[in-house]
Image: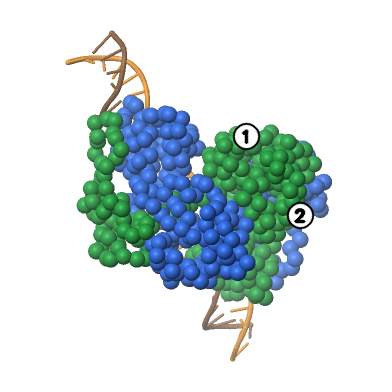
Chain colours: A green, B blue, C orange, D brown
Amino acid sequence: MSRSSTDNGHHGIPEATVNRLPVYLRALYALADRGIATVSSEELATAAGVNSAKLRKDLSHLGSYGTRGVGYDVEYLVYQVSRELGLTQDWPVIIVGAGNLGHALANYGGFASRGFRVSAIFDSDPLTVGTEIATLVVRHTDEIEAVIARHGVSIGVIATPAAAAQGVCDRLLAAGITSILNFAPVVLSVPPGVDVRKVDLSIELQILAFHAQRRAVVRVALGESPANAGAPANGQAPANGAGPADTGPPRRRAKDSRVPGETPAGVAARAMVT
Amino acid sequence: MSRSSTDNGHHGIPEATVNRLPVYLRALYALADRGIATVSSEELATAAGVNSAKLRKDLSHLGSYGTRGVGYDVEYLVYQVSRELGLTQDWPVIIVGAGNLGHALANYGGFASRGFRVSAIFDSDPLTVGTEIATLVVRHTDEIEAVIARHGVSIGVIATPAAAAQGVCDRLLAAGITSILNFAPVVLSVPPGVDVRKVDLSIELQILAFHAQRRAVVRVALGESPANAGAPANGQAPANGAGPADTGPPRRRAKDSRVPGETPAGVAARAMVT
DNA sequence: CTGACTTTGTGCATACGTTCACAAGGGCGT
DNA sequence: ACGCCCTTGTGAACGTATGCACAAAGTCAG
């Protein structure tokens, strides 16, 4: 989702696999905590919420760990996955923005654990600077460069308002950071070779809304009761009747072209396709 | 990433496209705010951080909006994308867990805007229940079912500790919720037809760490100075010399099989492939 | 009205990801 | 030592996503 150039596509280990390794790792830790020493691909896959063939193929990219007829040694696999992810070393991280979100992030436990440590948290508001969050004193953003240099930080977390994000990003880059986790609702523009991942609440909600709406339309098309569970409902009933099937665009400039699935019938028909 | 069965793959509009629509929508709002009435696929693509061909193909799935030789009418496209995403209706949302994260979420502005409204926030801690967060009074989790039924909520946000998440999830499902946004670091198990999306800070960091490590290895392999920018650094220098290249697994059960890329030379070689 | 110019919408080729299904390989009982 | 049974690791088939490159379709000047 956030591949940025320079890092050409084939690292030897596919991007989709990398995205799942942390999930496997977490599942493995959970197994280890329960004292389980060996696990089959089937069990681990279930714990991680994926298909077992996929899990095996993913793990096969790391090497041939695992014993046929038996499964994988949990502890050994934890080590191998950790190593592949680069978690056998410490990654100092800084958080920029000490608002509600920055606060939550700094306090987040699973954060500090396994491999990551918050070196510092910054804010530009003089009233916030100096306050304490989870054993850390909030510093002024002017100190960002110094802290990055001193601690050798290479991962920065942006938890500022949208308007400040790009500016902060530029400063982080100038200070040598090449990995950014962005919580601000903006598309950061960065040079090639910089890795940006974004976490965006409202985008996730919108995607959920799309699927929820889709389900609702399907249900209506099938003639089920639109009453309770999962219906668009916003208090009582869908506002102006047909909900998402209404046409009325605010206005249109050009000679209006073909508009597929615009009528109620069209929507129902599309929905029927399943 | 979080496709759950029931919803077969082909909704008519590809999943990858759906995941990008919210980004386009945000870019469109930004353009509209700047008073721009018309935009070309090239400009919009740049603003959204994607390739223009991809953008055009994505939009073509919604219909033939856009005028050849001119571009897209911003306001009209906002409407169409919003409608497709189901944002022309209101989506009441509940947040479970009023800790640091729940707090941050409830206060998040971009949340309440465009289409979503936080109906209620819950917590199980008697000390937290009754406190006020952004005009909302924190309710006890016992009231979850009643609130869902009364407000017709179909989207739930889980911001509890990991241990509580599955339990909360089950209650939400029982109360009729079919869309869940999960911030807890666990894989929720849900029946088919339920849509779960997860937001996981530590997973994102681990993915960043992987790429950062990869870049570092490449740099070392190319004989560049491992000094400053982006190096694994954790204070001074990589701990035990070669950093990620060290072999030493804690132990191994079976007769150890082929272990590719395990030696420093192996790592360098793999890195050289680029 | 015509013709030059711009930008959309899409067919096609390619790359990537997923899933099936099975041979290869190892443990374990006898 | 042998053979059965279990689970891994992977070849091959399929499906999805991406990006190029261009024809179709519109605008606008003259």
Q: Are marks 1 and 2 in contact (CB under 8 Å)?
A: no
Decide if residue A246 is on the left or right side of residue A101.
left
Instruction: Using the image, tell me which numbered label, if any, was put on residue B262.
Output: none
Identity of the residue drawn at 56% across and 40% down: A162
Q: Which comes sooner in the sequence, label 1 or label 2?
A: 2
In the rendered structure, the residue with mark 2 lies on which chain? A
Marks 1 and 2: which is nearer the front? 2
Q: Closer to the camera, B161 or C21?
A: B161
**Amino acid type shown at disc 2:** Thr
What x and y, as percent, mark residue B87? 38, 48
Question: At numbered mark 2, what does the secondary structure look like: helix, strand or loop?
Answer: loop
What x and y, as percent, mark residue B54? 42, 39
Instruction: Using the image, tell me which numbered label, if any, was put on residue A135.
Output: 2
Identity of the residue drawn at 75% across and 45% down: A130
Identity of the residue drawn at 44% across and 65% down: B147
Q: Closer to the camera, B69 or B159?
A: B159
Categorize mark 2 by other alpha carbons within 10 Å: few (<14), some (14-19), many (20+). few
Q: Is residue B156 above or below residue B226?
A: below
What x and y, as percent, mark residue B215? 67, 43
**Amino acid type shown at disc 1:** Gly
Query: Marks 1/2: CA distance?
Result: 27 Å
Residue tagged 1? A167
